[in-house]
Image (cartoon, rainbow, N blue to C red):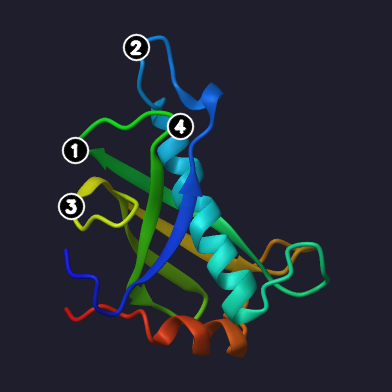
Amino acid sequence: MTAARRAREPFATRWNDNDQYGHLNNTIYYQAMDTAVNAFMMREGGLRPDGDGPIALCATSSCDFLASAGFPDALEVCIGVERLGRTSITWDLAILRAGEDDPIATGRFVHVFVDPASRRPVDIPVAIRTAIEKLILPS
């Protein structure tokens, strides 16, 4: 995994993220990825989930777990774009310990932009498209 053409979003672990086995529960990895891409789109592209513009819904997601983490580990989500379509984004994601380059998990999210009322697909807003174009990874 190369850090080039990727953004990094911090993700703080919490005491209750650990499960009875003493490591982060698998659902926390999904929360980290979802939080990171939405925070990025809100900050860099002006996504307003509470507004009247398009929203991004998760159509599919996956995660491969490579190493354990647990509270109080400070994590980062490394964000890249695998595919940018007219109405959807396929995110290429990695979860890392803060300041490190070896992923503890890798994942993929597909977001589809929809009208908040009809839930029908719409074009990705220009500001969001512009913000994420710099994250498109080489094929």
The residue indicated by pointer 1 is 66
Q: As shown in the figure, which amino acid type bears the numbered disc 3? A: Asp
Could you tell me if residue 75 is visible in this image? yes
Q: Are marks 2 and 4 in contact (CB under 8 Å)?
A: no
The earlier-in-sequence mark between 3 and 1 is 1
Residue 111 image offset from top left, x and y in percent: 50, 62
Quadrant of the rendered image containing residue 137: bottom left
**Residue 21, labelled with which disc?**
2
Which of the image's four quarters has the C terminus? Answer: bottom left
**Residue 27, labelled with which disc?**
4
The residue indicated by pointer 3 is 102
C-alpha gap between disc 1 and disc 4:
15 Å
Q: Mark 2 or mark 4, which is nearer to you?
A: 2
Residue 22 image offset from top left, x and y in percent: 36, 15
Residue 6 image offset from top left, x and y in percent: 33, 73
Graded by Cα atoms within 10 Å as few (under 14), some (14 to 19) or many (20 or more), the crowding at tag 3 reads some
The earlier-in-sequence mark between 4 and 3 is 4
The earlier-in-sequence mark between 3 and 2 is 2
The earlier-in-sequence mark between 2 and 4 is 2
Q: Residue at x 19, y 38 (%)?
A: 66
Q: As shown in the figure, which amino acid type bears the numbered disc 1? A: Leu
Q: Mark 4 or mark 3, which is nearer to you?
A: 3
